[in-house]
Amino acid sequence: MQETQQIRDQIKDQALKCGFDLVRITGADEFVKDRDAALTRIEAGQMDGLPWFTESRVRRGTDPQALLPGVRSIICLGLSYLGQEGQESGSGKGTVARYARVKDYHRTMKRRMKSFVRSLEEQLDIPVAARWYVDDGPMLDRAAAVRSGLGWFGKSTNVLTQSYGSWVLLGQVLTDLDLEPDQPLKKTCGACVRCIDDCPTGAIVAPYIVDNARCISYQTIENRGVIPLEMRPLIGDWIFGCDICQDVCPVNLKAEQPNLPIPPAEAVGQSGQLPLAEILAMTEEEFRNRFQGTSIMRAKRVGLQKNACVALGNQRDESGVAALGTALKTADPLVRGHAAWALGQIATSEAIDALEQALASESDPYVQEETGAALLVARNREVR
Ligand code: B12
Ligand code: SF4
Ligand code: SF4
């Protein structure tokens, strides 16, 4: 090992100075067990819906040498995104997961990682070969964090940490520095199964296994198509991501606030409550102007509007009918289909009128099908 305890200390100090909350080091060995777990997950269809999550991506992402030839160590970094408590959700509003209540974390983390590597080079006075990854790279971010002792796997699959709970975003700097690794933690969830019991969709199909397509986070962020009918009532008012398995986790009760928080996403607000009717009425330009620089962009306008329809349908509040009726006439086909479903759930006479009018003029077969089905539901349930 070319380094001394002093270099390790310098690295850790510098990472904290650059704005990270947690830093640990692991070696550059292949992630054999994690690779097997990920490949088994793909084979079992539990990553279905994410076409980019392929076998070859997993193989490459679990072989550090393939990512940075000559790599000797992986510096694992964690950044908390916990904010102050927001208000409870209300009718007409949809909830955004906590990580999207701050500005797009990819940018903040990558910026901080870059300045971390630069400052290391200055301090050590040698060029450091490095590559860094946050979320969108092929590495299994959680597997690296767990092996470095930064945290441990919760049964929800989220990585839990001692000081910040699971409210941490994870990234890695691969480097040619030869550093002594930290040891993995010995902590586990013990007998707790709160997240499994409280997940509304049963997405945590077994401890440490999330079935992607059943997860509200997937349905509200990544799914580019129709949200399956059976999932819609289970989504509640989540319109971007889901925090239930983290909100109920006892480890998170004592989570500390970040040292240098990611700036808040003003367009979302600390409570993460967005007005659903406003979202439904947004043009592409308005969407971009409002959400540029936030994680919400990942869902795209049509995705967020589909989700707004589902939340309005689940709230069954007649004040949502006007916005849904307009969307049913003017929005993109995918949004029209979900608006029809929501009107079917609300089932007031105005909702039924809107559905009948739409059925008479609708030409898109998918929207026709949704509208016809919604009318049947509404007529059975009509609320006067
Ligand atoms: C795909 C993806 C998703 C998918 C699939 C999630 C999943 N469970 O795989 C969806 C869209 C659903 C999703 C949702 C969320 N995600 Co996401 N996601 C990713 C991504 C891009 C890849 C994850 C992956 O590789 N999955 C493959 C499976 C095989 O990995 P795994 O679930 O971690 O499984 C491991 C364990 O199960 C373990 N294992 C297996 N068996 C056993 C047995 C025992 C006894 C033990 C101890 C362990 C164990 O081995 C497996 C391999 O390491 C990562 C970023 C990245 N590049 O890594 C972010 C990432 C995992 N997501 C993140 C976040 C924040 C979220 C959400 C909280 C967002 C939200 N609020 O909506 C939710 C959480 C949902 C949940 N309960 O997992 C963070 C997690 C941070 C943390 N503290 O864990 C990451 C790391 C992004 C980042 N860089 O910060 N996500
Ligand atoms: S994010 Fe929500 S839907 Fe997904 S596993 Fe956690 S509680 Fe279940
Ligand atoms: S809720 Fe319980 S089982 Fe789930 S991750 Fe937290 S401690 Fe583990």
Image (tube, rainbow, N blue to C red):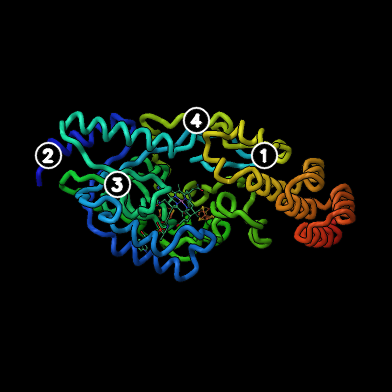
In which quadrant of this rendering is ligand 3 seen?
bottom left
Rendering coords of residue 14 (x, y %): 24, 32
The answer to whether 13 appears left or right of 243 in the picture is: left
Residue 264 is tagged as 4
The mark closer to the camera, 4 or 1, is: 4
Q: Which residue is mark 3?
A: 150
Camera-side residue of 383 and 285: 285
For the residue labelled by badge 2, is the local secondary structure a helix, a strand or a loop? helix
The three-letter amino acid code for the residue at tag 4 is Pro
Rendering coords of residue 118 (x, y %): 26, 32
Camera-side residue of 362 and 186: 362
Decide: few, some or many residues near mark 4? Use Cα within 10 Å; few <14, some 14-19, many ≥20: some
Mark 4–mark 1 distance (CA, rounded to whole Å): 19 Å
The three-letter amino acid code for the residue at tag 1 is Lys
Residue 206 is tagged as none
Indicate the quadrant where residue 193 lies.
bottom left
